[in-house]
Image: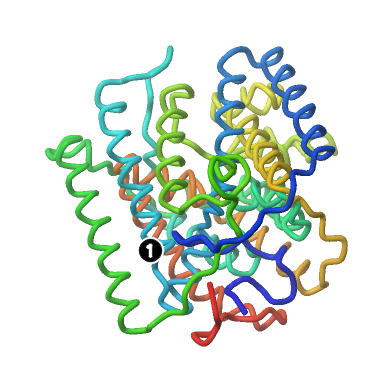
Amino acid sequence: MSLRDPETVAVTEPSTTETDTTGTSPPAQRKVLTIGGVLAVALGVATAAVGGWRMAVLYAIGLAFGLVLFHARFGFTSAWRQLVAVGQGKALRAHMLMLAVAAALFAPILSAGLGLGTTPEGSVSPVSISVVVGAFLFGLGMQVGGSCASGTLYNVGGGQTAIVFTLVGFIVGAVLGAWHFAFWTSTLPSGPEISLARTPLGYGGALAATLAVLGLIAAGTLVVARRKQPPRLSRPPAAAGLARAVRGSWPLWVGAVGLAVLNALTLVVKGKAWGITSAFTLWGSKVAQAAGVDVADWGYWSSPDNAATLAGPVLAHGTSVMDFGIILGAFLAAAAGGVFVLHRRVPRKVVVGAIIGGILMGYGARIAYGCNIGAYFAGIASFSLHGWLWAVMAIIGTYAGLKARPLIGLAVPKRTDSSC
């Protein structure tokens, strides 16, 4: 048994580790790969026609994100679950590497304003009650729904049928969060936006402090592991030689560095760091608007930038085109590796968990100014204190989520499990 649910492999992110299990990869699924290639090119052409060169570049970056996420099987849900459930910290140490590389890249980009025709801005949000509640709900939803924001996209692209229900719940929750956004951010007490780089530390001191904390956390996971003696992690079979880069699984550290570099590239091209869930809010709000709901009157959509986004086409929204790219990038990677499989039968309790978890994550992400990508990854890399607050509350939510799983009939990993 692994830290994935025994009911179905489609309920959560694949296991992650730095060590590969030797084996023979299945042949590429040429028909599926061809379909994916045609879809990727067609959407790229449409994106360029509607949104211009910048949207086309962001779409290409999204494709790269999907490839990296899938090949590295880079998990956020699984990393926190592994640590909390059995004390396995390898995947979380990969997070620390990713954050360290991203922060080292973000510091010069933000301090020098190195943008491609735009001035880059870090992901800095208020330290508030909405972040506390939203991040907790997100952590809870991750473990119940079996995925996170990035994991939802690349698992959908990889053919994980159950995660489609998580995505639907995500969109519903994001719309509900947008509806209540003004209450959480304006009515309730909220602190200021605090960036370590805007203190006397400056970017150099902020980077040094961030790297020190990341190092301490990584060291702490080793202490936990020595005490709990967690099970070893398993890994999908890897192709040999050069085929590994195209078809096999990648070491976790490669995924960490790749995601950090792509996030920095996103910051340069887009002017903002990588995010995911604002697209879910947009898609769901457009559907609600088409059904006659006056979403434009909601506080979330009242700001000039958000109002323009709601009024504009989806393919002119950078986060949306990147999300589409992630799905198709993972689709291509899965087909090239011969592992794209649609699971036709999904247990009812898994569907229930996926929808509930998705709603909790969507709602939590919206009121917490982001998800595991926009708040945790981008926030910490931008030296924002709200990113650290988000991380702490998401870990607490993870613990609650593991306690909640049996309530809907889902298994909870045990220390005796053979892998994570």
Neighbours of disc 1 within 10 Å: few (<14), some (14-19), many (20+):
some
Q: Is residue 280 visible?
A: no
Most foreground residue, 80 or 328: 328
**Quadrant housing residue 1:** bottom right
Q: Residue at x 31, y 34 (%)?
A: 105
Q: Residue at x 59, y 81 (%)?
A: 412
Q: Residue at x 53, y 45 (%)?
A: 241
Q: Secondary structure at mark 1?
A: helix
The residue sitting at the bottom extreme is 416
In the image, residue 239 above or below residue 267: below
Q: Position of residue 19 (x, y in %)?
A: 46, 61
Q: Position of residue 321 (x, y in %)?
A: 64, 29
In the image, residue 182 above or below residue 414: above
In the image, residue 43 above or below residue 282: above
Most foreground residue, 227 or 386: 227
Q: Amino acid at mark 1?
A: Val
User: What residue would you read off at disc 1?
Assistant: 392
Q: Position of residue 172 (x, y in %)?
A: 72, 51
Q: Is residue 300 visible?
A: yes
Q: Is residue 141 left or right of residue 337?
A: left
